[in-house]
Image: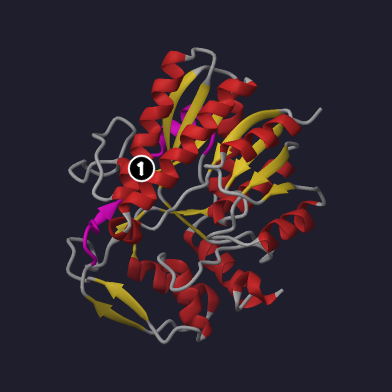
Amino acid sequence: MAKKVLVTGGAGYIGSHTCVSLLEAGYEAVVVDDLRNSDKEALNRVEELTGKKVDFYQFDVCDEAKLDKVFSEHKINSIIHFAGLKAVGESVEKPLEYYDNNINSTLALCRMMLKHKVKNLIFSSSATVYDQKNEVPLSEEGTLGCSNPYGWTKLMCEQILRDLTHAHKELSVVLLRYFNPIGAHESGIIGEDPTGIPNNLLPYITQTALGRREQLTVHGNDYDTPDGTGVRDYIHVVDLANGHVKALQYADSRTGSDAINLGTGKGYSVLDIVKAFEEVNGVKVPYVIGPRRAGDLATVYAAPQKAKEVLGWEAEKGIEDMCRDAWRWQKKNPQGYRNS
């Protein structure tokens, strides 16, 4: 019988792509999502893409009574925990909301794991858990420490999960630290659909290319980088999704907790991305240079070797794929999921 995976936040950008990878790998997916930053249409399209059904429940993962019911109705084998608030800037303005939601949802899942004897959990962590003083590339052995409440919620959840596996030796937790996911499924059927003004670079580029936004603002061009703009490790969302399937297989074969970077190990500047996007898609992206954003670093990219050694995973898609797939999704869905 196929193993059932509970995917919290499964209707979101990374969650929906991971559901496709799971279903294609022969798993069954049960999704809990309150749709605060996502759309049920994403899951309809996951079903359309894979020809398989997704069991969906709409509620906040902090709601333990409803969570308990889901665990009682399904024989859950593993959990992938994406659900949470995720905007760095907003976390500075609303720290209590972030601590409340991100930590309590994780605690609720931990209690359910123990109650329903679920052994494996894959946690959606972030490169924001690394202290700014680390040298790049960032390796899993780097010093941990955060510069915003969002990052702290991720690091605190990592600690909670480490302590849990220490107390309960049968459990297996993989802490996946992502870098910058971009792109979309190559079908153009699912992709990134931020509500309001995008926080991330690529949706801002695609919406500007489409004419939904007047121009892209590049935050700072006076960093110590080749062209003065910030350098980041961009990873195709489908590569990232496949990394979760590999992490599930890894969790199945061991106990304890392990932190693993998911990145490409290559850094691209903001203007590199703009240029690549224009060249691959034959469209112009008007941009202006604005002031730096508080808390932004010059250069951040991953040391990705551990994922290759431990998970047998590495990123396969390049920057051209990321730009081409993001544009295909945006052109097919000019208003995101609200088209349908």
In the image, residue 307 lies in the stretch drawn in magenta: yes
Query: Can residue 36 be seen?
Result: yes
Asked whether, in this view, residue 163 is left or right of residue 318, the answer is left
Mark 1 = which residue?
153
Q: Is residue 112 left or right of residue 217?
A: right
Residue 273 location, quadrant: bottom left
Q: Residue at x 55, y 32 (%)?
A: 247
Read off the magenta span.
293-313
For image coordinates 52% across by 42% down, the residue present is 62
Q: Residue at x 73, y 36 (%)?
A: 27
Q: Amino acid at mark 1?
A: Thr
Position of residue 108 measured from the top left corner of the image (x, y, whole percent): 51, 34
Residue 323 included in the magenta stretch of the image: no
Q: Position of residue 65 (x, y in %)?
A: 61, 36
- SS for tag 1? helix
Is residue 79 shown above or below 329?
above
Residue 158 location (% of width, % of height): 39, 33
